Amino acid sequence: MAIHEPAVAQEVDERTEQISIPYVPKDLSDPVRARHLLMRIDAAALKACGDMGGLSIPTQEIIEWSDCHHESFTRGVAAFHSPTLTRMADTIDPGIGSTAQKH
């Protein structure tokens, strides 16, 4: 059976869930608290890009290394308008995310 009409691709839903991250001003100035804030930003980015709970390890790794995760993490950090937080974020690899930093 031949197809006589062009195939129509479905639109991909590229909306990312918006997640609030509570913080206090000291989270932006104290290095230890800033690192914890970065871990929370990373966890929120992962959740926004596909939630990690109950997914297979290969699927989790795909999400961890995805453009969605990287861009969500970067936007999350930028939203705080904190040079300190931005510098700290630049020194970590968002691909390793919160899972590696919790240990």
Image (tube, rainbow, N blue to C red):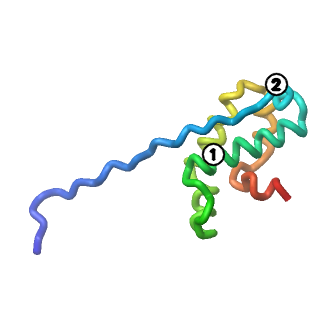
Tell how many labels: 2
Quickly name the residue at label 2.
25
Residue 54: name its quadrant: bottom right
Where does the image place residue 75, in percent across and percent down from the top left? 62, 35
Q: Is residue 71 above or below residue 84?
A: below
In front of the other: label 1 or label 2?
Answer: 2
Where does the image place residue 63, in percent across and percent down from the top left? 59, 57
Quickly name the residue at label 1.
45
**Three-letter amino acid code at disc 1?**
Ala
Q: Residue at x 69, y 54 (%)?
A: 95
Q: Is residue 16 above or below residue 95?
A: above
Measured in 3D between alpha carbons, the distance from the residue under mark 1 to the one under mark 2, in whole angstroms, is 21 Å
Q: Quadrant of the C terminus?
A: bottom right
Q: Is residue 8 above or below residue 2?
A: above
Label 2 residue SS: loop
Q: Residue at x 10, y 75 (%)?
A: 1
**Three-letter amino acid code at disc 2?**
Pro
Q: Nearer the viewer, residue 96 or 50?
A: 50
Where does the image place residue 34, in percent across and percent down from the top left? 83, 36
Left or right position of 28 against 2: right
